[in-house]
Amino acid sequence: MDPADAKDFDDAISYRKLKNGNHEIGVHIADVSHYVTPGNALDDEAYQKATSVYLPDRVNPMLPEHISNVLCSLRPNEDKLAFSAIFQITDKAEVKQYWLGKTVIHSNRRYTYEEAQQIIETGEGDHADVILTVNNISQTLRKYRFDEGAINFNSTEVRFKLDEKGSPVGIVLKESKEAHQLIEELMLLANRYVAKHVSKIKINNKAIPFPYRIHDTPDEEKLLPFIAFANKFGYKFDISSAEAIAASFNKLLKDIKGRPEEAVLQQLGIRTMAKAKYTESNVGHYGLGFEYYCHFTSPIRRYPDVMVHRILQDVLEDSVKIDKRMEEKCKHCSERERAAMDSERSANKYKQVQYMGNYVGEEFDAIVSGVSKFGFWAETVDHMCEGLVSITSLAEHDSFRHSESDYALVGHRTGKKFTMGDKVRIKVIAANLERRQLDYEWVNEK
């Protein structure tokens, strides 16, 4: 299951009902390490890039296109080399057994997420019984994950409809539905079991160097101001332990659903979180609630996954090699990932500015998404395009001061407040492509 426009298929799943009543679910991942061997030219280039970069109108792949889209891609109706994690799971989503190893697979059906979602919603379609069964197991895994401390932040992605020249002609807000979650939970399961399996291997009583994917507990310096702000809305936080903080976050995210303060508290909550990264020093993944976690499931587009495949193969063959450069490699991959994310954000912003340039002079509903001493940022509801309403343009209405503790601009005479999460009406004033900047003006609807 992949997006409709995907060309490189990293993963596939298999299913069969076992005689003992349990379910066998296989997570099959493209075996890139078979072709990209340590030290060859492909490997050197892949390591330097460390990740594919996905821009709105193009992809800068980590590997040459023929390898990404043809040779390694798990395309339907073709024999493909894979690295597989196969689980025996009960109806209650308890893992009774698992097996890790190299395989040859033959995928017999490709689904887009939209096709799979329709089957989940209607109960009809190709292999509907299998998809519904696997989806029930994935949803149970998801429930366990949140019950055990994973934090349930929701995020909406923006996708652009482009014309033949690459100019944006529409913006689609992409939500995570059950078809996405079906795949996501199985990938998380495979990643967790691979990391746990390797963590048990010791040489001279020492863990072997391995690129864990870690996510530390929230930074207290960021957390305390957020808690003070949440308290103003009546929400309480227990900070007695990392587990208590996670439980408080989940209760908050549940309680604010559909309320006016939902957008601001969710956005500020995400900002309190530490950045996930690669390291051989495992401290667990706080956001997912996992003690052991790694990236195993996307080797076509992420170099750490290729490293994990190689180490896992060495473990399975009982021929582990100690890589003294592991932490250096983890740091490099984390840096390249952040650079790729910055590029993707910049490219998305460029396309948003290009798109909104068609609507200069028009008005839209928006949400206040940020506040500073020189104005507030507003994000349009329909397209999530963010622009600045400058303090200068507000001067004709009132003299505003910045209240950091309230994340607000406050009018001196009128007491008018612009607080993060507020609904506002804005007019598009200018779209500067060179600066990737949108200028809005507040529309005073008295």
Image (cartoon, rainbow, N blue to C red):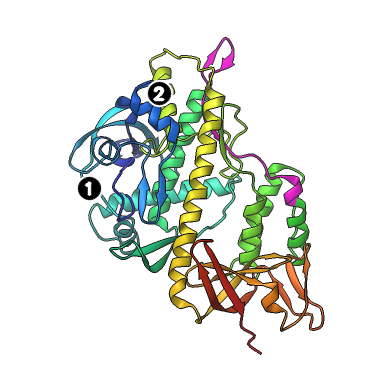
Nearer the observer, disc 2 or disc 1? 2
Residue range corresponding to the magenta coloring: 200-223
26 w.r.t. 257: above or below? above
Asked if residue 191 can be seen in this view, the reply is yes
Few, some or many C-alpha atoms within 10 Å of disc 1 (few <14, some 14-19, many ≥20)?
few
- Looking at the picture, how far across and down is residue 55, in whole percent? 41, 52
Residue under label 1, please give it. 109
* Residue sitting at x 58%, y 48%: 147
Question: What SS does tag 1 mark?
Answer: loop
| Furthest residue toward front | 434
* Residue sitting at x 51%, y 81%: 361
- Looking at the picture, how far across and down is residue 170, in whole percent? 38, 69
Cα separation, mark 2 vs mark 1, equals 28 Å
Residue 289 falls in image quadrant: top right
10 w.r.t. 40: above or below? below
Few, some or many C-alpha atoms within 10 Å of disc 2 (few <14, some 14-19, many ≥20)?
some
Residue 305 falls in image quadrant: top left
* Residue 246 falls left or right of residue 343: right
Specify the amino acid type for callout 1.
Arg
Specify the amino acid type for callout 2.
Arg
- Looking at the picture, how far across and down is residue 314, in whole percent? 41, 18
- Which quadrant of the rendered structure holds the C terminus? bottom right
* Residue sitting at x 48%, y 72%: 382
Residue under label 2, please give it. 310
Residue 413 falls in image quadrant: bottom right
Asked if residue 100 can be seen in this view, the reply is no
